[in-house]
Image (cartoon, rainbow, N blue to C red):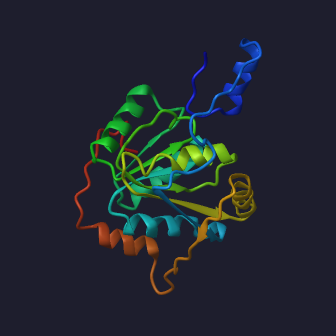
């Protein structure tokens, strides 16, 4: 018997290699977001992604899980958010086990408002009170989209999942919608023209108390 929360290509390959005439049994719909998750998306210019993310984080009072496609992207984004004054941590494949545990424990205990993660590093991640999932990068596969947005709206709580799509990602997001037979609401955010969004958020966060863990965990 083989059990998996999601049947991605690598797992499917192992099943084919080591099992004879396997029968796949899916419990519930694996290609449908939970009804407790409100989906929305922002189609933005490539240079606007970070500013839109800042605005989303500024208005979100709960804890937020952000997904990127790559380890390098997770590093860059987490460090940028820390410079902006957000209590942020990250998990990806190049982090040590102690660093991952420290980041995850800090997020679960509320010491971090934001956790930046890659898809692989977040497998098996269970935090019941994630208020908002943000796809900073559009996932490559519809199944990854389901896995990501499934990190919120758990334990009977309502959740929100937002996707930022720029350039070619707009078409990729539409393909995910077709695959999943979804229509994700498009939203817009007004970008400030008379002041820097980064400075606005830094000034607002200046009065907040942000708790950091030791340097090897807090990026």
Whether residue 63 is visible: yes
Residue lying at the far bottom of the rendered structure: 194
Between 127 and 167, the one nearer to me in the picture: 127
Instruction: Please give the name of the residue rendered at 71% of the width and 32% of the height, measured from the top-left corner.
Output: 9
Instruction: Please give the name of the residue rendered at 52% of the width and 69% of the height, measured from the top-left corner.
Output: 52
Instruction: Please give the name of the residue rendered at 45% of the width and 82% of the height, measured from the top-left corner.
Output: 195
Residue 165 lies left or right of residue 97; in this view the side is right
Q: Which percent across, then down, holds residue 107?
A: 34, 44
Up/down of 137 relative to 204, above or below: above
Q: Which percent across, then down, holds residue 173?
A: 69, 59
Up/down of 165 relative to 125, above or below: below
Between 17 and 42, the one nearer to me in the picture: 17
Count of numbered badges drawn on the protein? 0
Whether residue 69 is visible: no
Q: Which percent across, then down, holds residue 163?
A: 57, 60
Quadrant containing the N terminus is top right
Quadrant containing the C terminus is top left
> Hey, which quadrant is residue 11 in on the image?
top right
> Hey, which quadrant is residue 200 in on the image?
bottom left
């Amino acid at each position: 018997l083989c059990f998996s929360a999601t049947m991605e290509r690598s797992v499917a390959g192992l099943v084919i290699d080591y099992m004879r005439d396997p029968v796949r049994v899916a419990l519930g719909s694996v290609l449908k977001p939970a009804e407790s998750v409100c989906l929305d998306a922002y189609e933005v210019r490539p240079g606007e992604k970070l500013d839109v993310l800042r605005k989303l984080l500024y208005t979100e009072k709960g804890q937020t899980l952000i997904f990127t496609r790559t380890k390098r992207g997770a590093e860059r984004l987490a460090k940028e958010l820390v410079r902006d004054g957000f209590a942020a941590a990250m998990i990806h494949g190049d982090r040590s086990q102690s660093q991952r545990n420290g980041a995850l424990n800090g997020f679960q205990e509320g010491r971090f408002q934001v956790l930046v993660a890659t898809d692989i590093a977040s497998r098996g991640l269970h935090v019941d009170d994630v208020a908002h999932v943000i796809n900073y990068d559009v996932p490559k596969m519809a199944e990854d989209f389901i896995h990501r947005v499934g990190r919120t709206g758990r334990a009977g709580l309502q959740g929100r999942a937002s996707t930022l799509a720029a350039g070619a990602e707009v078409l990729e997001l539409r393909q995910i919608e077709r695959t999943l037979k979804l229509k994700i609401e498009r939203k817009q955010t007004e970008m400030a023209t008379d002041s820097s969004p980064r400075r606005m958020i830094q000034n607002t966060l200046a009065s907040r108390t942000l708790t950091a863990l030791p340097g090897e965990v807090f990026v």
